[in-house]
Amino acid sequence: MGNEISRFASGAPWEPIFGYSRAVRAGGWLAVSGTTSFDERGLIVGQGQMYVQARQAIANIAAALERAGMSLANVVRTRMFVTDMSRFAEVARAHGEAFSANPPAATIVEVTRLIHPDMLIEIEADAYADAPSAEAAPAGRTRPVALARRKAAASGKRARTAR
């Protein structure tokens, strides 16, 4: 289980063109790709509004985390790329609203432009949670030996496993 890598798509129009996943989980780590303010139809939300775009990007990150069994509380690092640093207060407001209970390490960098001229912000996030246990693994992907050992340890008995 520790070496398993899971990939999660969001359906964004750029994923198949560019060849990337919205999020990739490796063990307990989840890397969420740069995320912008697109909606479920692939349209940009909040044209010209930094705060609205930041909130939508964070909502999109939250959706990716949820698909991987995590939440914003699991985020340990964010990286924000903005096209206008003079609008930092709008970004800080949206970030603070989402992460004030569990503040991650964070970086903000000004860039010349994002993939679409109407995009003002792109946010990446890294999250961590204990790797899923064998009990929570999808059917057909459990590890019986590890499962037996964990159950035995919980009951105080020694596991009997065939080799």
Image (cartoon, rainbow, N blue to C red):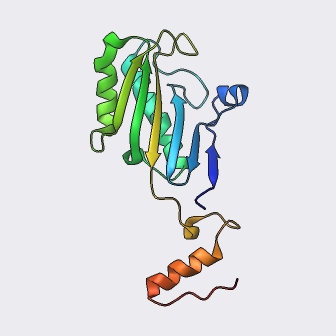
Residue 81 in the figure: left or right of residue 64: left
Can residue 73 be seen from the camera position used here? yes
Q: Is residue 98 above or below residue 93?
A: below
Tell me what residue is drawn at x 41 percent, y 33 percent.
78
Q: Quadrant of residue 43?
A: top right
Q: Residue at x 46, y 13 (%)?
A: 111
Placement of 37 over or under 3, stated as above or below: above
Q: How many marks?
A: 0
Taking the image as shown, residue 40 lies to the left or right of residue 80, namely right
Q: Nearer the viewer, residue 79 or 116?
A: 79
Image coordinates for residue 73, horizontal then vertical, percent = 37, 47
Residue 103, how many percent across, how many down? 30, 40
Task: Give left or right: position of 42 versus 65.
Answer: right
Relative to 90, is 23 above or below?
Answer: below
Instruction: Residue 162: give x, y in percent of width and height.
Output: 69, 85
Q: Quadrant of residue 91?
A: top left
Q: Is residue 54 left or right of residue 37?
A: left
Query: In which quadrant is the C terminus drawn?
Result: bottom right
Q: Is residue 5 above or below residue 110?
A: below
The image quadrant where one finds the N terminus is bottom right
Work out whether residue 13 can be spotted: no
Q: Position of residue 106 (x, y in %)?
A: 35, 32
- The residue shown at (29%, 26%) is 93
- Between residue 134 and residue 117, name the one nearer to us: 134
